[in-house]
């Protein structure tokens, strides 16, 4: 855990040198642990890149600037390479690895191999309110990336109300507020919600405002997987208005998680969404968003097509309902509607490993079977239910490329992975964005790509002394080869590590060398300093 603002010994020595009016300048070159020589340096700010050196001493950056000589234990010749701050991923489900029993998984290789040194967790309302205890455990267990925790609405609400679909009474609301306040005082970066998900979806806007205020009054962010990214309930635009209102009335900066227009009913709405957010920003509301650079979300045939009531009681209950002709007809007609909303059977790629349908779209597989897509989907679901286990996974191509690119170009949008199993975004978000949107399509330039993956994220989340290559800052430093930086993961093979990271340092320790994970567990839990209004 790091809450300190200590300057490193090196910085103190440098200060002593300058106080001695250049007395040090004529002596031997200053000792450092690592010098990265001659790379093209993007420091995380909006400044133009330059060719120069970056030196690391201990866990801090000792030097950033034009070529200079050092007495270094290790020299990295970085000519032709890009040198940048380690990427900071603001929306992840990296807990899968960070909380593993296996120390090798806790190194969090999926992120390290794509250049990310810090991940934000507890998103979508999932973050535990026990921030201090959780931070202690994570730090003691040995993790490979830094971690920034949110306290989550889902975790708080279910602790007080269970899964109840009702409003809290006064005492219950007070307990929830105390939990959020306690988590903020323990160092959480803000309050996250996933209003799309039950039981969070049962909350009124006012309930969320009351809790977000506990974060806002302590300098925290309101981060939301909003109530509707599509046309399921209140619709994308009203849902976005709700998110802005919550932040505005709670006095908290608003951050949209994985911003998108999901499904055919809202595709093409990016300009309207951008206008709404620009208007809020113009009247002084601090609104930002993150985005993953993929056209598909990860889902399953069940989750994306079946109505919720049809699976109430589990798989066997579903099979029983399908045995009743009237109920089965109702299920089929609701599935037709959900399939339409998601862009039809051609938009669902079947990705479960090792199945006869793997690698084909639902449309292709249905055609091969000579059945219609809904019947085909039901046959797959029924087979998987009978066998137990999994097999219904899909990549759901539900975003329009024009929306994705337009959102990516907004000055208030930063890069995230939303990394979760079964989708290549967990292992390949940064190189995919670089390859497709910087190199191939030119949607954004390299400077913008780096800025929105580093310093700008640190600014939004108020992550101190990271996100920039600056003397005295923590040494989270990335060196990648612009010719080799590339994803390996695909929708059908989503767990392949990315390549092209020449070096990645996390708190000054070497986490990646020549695309190879060293096994160092140098990550820390980054807690905010305690706000003033705490007990
Ligand atoms: Zn989410």
Image (cartoon, rainbow, N blue to C red):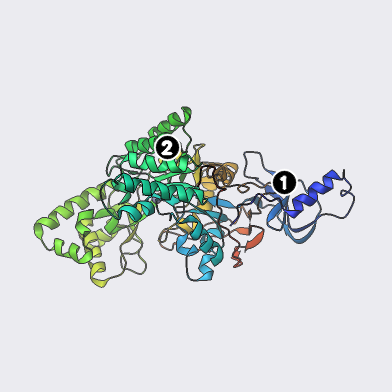
In the image, residue 79 sits, relative to residue 387, either above or below, namely above
How crowded pointer 1 is (Cα within 10 Å; few <14, some 14-19, many 20+) is rated as some
Judging depth in this view, the residue of 104 and 489 nearest the camera is 104
Residue at image location 35% in from the left, 51% down from the top: 157
Q: Mark 1 vs ligand 1: CB under 8 Å?
A: no
Residue 51: give its label. Answer: 1
User: Between residues 300 and 32, which one lies in front from this camera angle?
Assistant: 32
Q: Is residue 194 left or right of residue 344?
A: right
* Residue 221 percent across, percent down from the top left: 47, 43
> For the residue labelled by badge 1, is the local secondary structure a helix, a strand or a loop?
strand
| Camera sees residue 493 | yes
Pointer 2 with pointer 1, Cβ within 8 A: no
Residue 515: name its quadrant: bottom right
Pointer 2 or 1: first along the chain = 1
Q: Which residue is mark 2?
A: 250
The residue lying at 28 percent from left, 61 percent from top is 365
Q: Position of residue 121 (x, y in %)?
A: 47, 54
Q: Is residue 78 above or below residue 259?
A: below
């Amino acid at each position: 855990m790091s809450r300190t603002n200590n300057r490193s010994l090196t910085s103190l020595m440098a200060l002593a040198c300058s106080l001695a009016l250049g007395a040090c300048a004529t002596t031997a070159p200053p000792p450092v642990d690592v010098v990265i020589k001659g790379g093209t340096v993007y420091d995380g700010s909006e400044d133009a890149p330059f060719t120069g050196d970056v030196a690391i001493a201990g866990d801090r950056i000792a030097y950033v600037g034009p070529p200079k000589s050092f007495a270094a234990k290790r020299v990295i010749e970085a000519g032709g390479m890009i040198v940048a701050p380690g990427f900071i991923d603001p929306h992840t489900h990296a807990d899968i690895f960070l909380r593993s029993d296996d120390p090798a998984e806790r190194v969090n290789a999926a992120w390290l191999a794509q250049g990310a040194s810090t991940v934000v967790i507890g998103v979508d309302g999932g973050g535990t309110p026990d921030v201090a205890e959780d931070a202690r455990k994570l730090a003691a267990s040995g993790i490979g990336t830094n971690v920034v925790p949110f306290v989550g609405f889902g975790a708080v609400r279910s602790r007080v109300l269970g899964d109840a679909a009702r409003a809290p009474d006064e005492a219950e609301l007070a307990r929830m507020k105390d939990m959020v306040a306690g988590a903020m005082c323990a160092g959480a970066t803000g309050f996250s919600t996933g209003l799309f998900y039950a039981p969070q979806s049962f909350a009124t806007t006012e309930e969320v405002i009351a809790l977000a205020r506990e974060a806002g009054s302590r300098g925290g962010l309101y981060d939301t997987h909003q109530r509707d990214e599509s046309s399921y309930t209140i619709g994308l635009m009203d849902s976005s208005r709700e998110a802005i209102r919550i932040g505005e009335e709670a006095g908290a900066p608003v951050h949209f998680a994985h911003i998108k227009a999901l499904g055919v009913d809202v595709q093409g709405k990016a300009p309207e969404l951008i206008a709404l957010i620009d208007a809020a920003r113009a009247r002084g509301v601090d609104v930002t968003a993150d985005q993953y650079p993929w056209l598909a979300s990860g889902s399953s045939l069940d989750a994306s097509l079946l109505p919720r009531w049809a699976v109430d009681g589990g798989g066997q209950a579903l099979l029983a309902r399908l045995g009743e002709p009237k109920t089965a007809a109702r299920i089929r007609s609701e599935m037709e509607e959900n399939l339409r909303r998601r862009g039809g059977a051609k938009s669902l790629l079947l990705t479960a490993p090792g199945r006869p349908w793997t690698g084909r779209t639902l449309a292709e597989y249905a055609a091969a079977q000579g059945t219609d897509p809904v019947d085909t989907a039901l046959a797959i679901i029924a087979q998987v239910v009978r066998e137990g286990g999994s097999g219904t996974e899909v990549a759901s191509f539900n975003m329009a490329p024009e929306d994705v690119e337009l959102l990516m170009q907004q000055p208030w949008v930063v890069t995230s992975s939303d990394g979760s199993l079964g989708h290549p975004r967990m292992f390949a978000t940064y190189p995919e964005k670089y390859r497709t949107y910087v190199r191939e399509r030119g949607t954004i330039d390299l400077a913008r790509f780096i800025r929105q993956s580093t310093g700008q994220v640190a600014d939004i989340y108020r992550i101190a002394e990271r996100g920039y290559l600056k003397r005295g800052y923590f040494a989270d430093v990335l060196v990648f080869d612009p010719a080799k930086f590339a994803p390996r993961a695909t929708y059908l093979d989503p767990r392949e590590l990315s390549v092209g990271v020449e070096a990645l340092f996390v708190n000054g320790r070497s986490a990646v060398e020549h695309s190879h994970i060293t096994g160092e567990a140098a990550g820390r839990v980054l807690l905010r300093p305690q706000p003033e209004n705490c007990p």
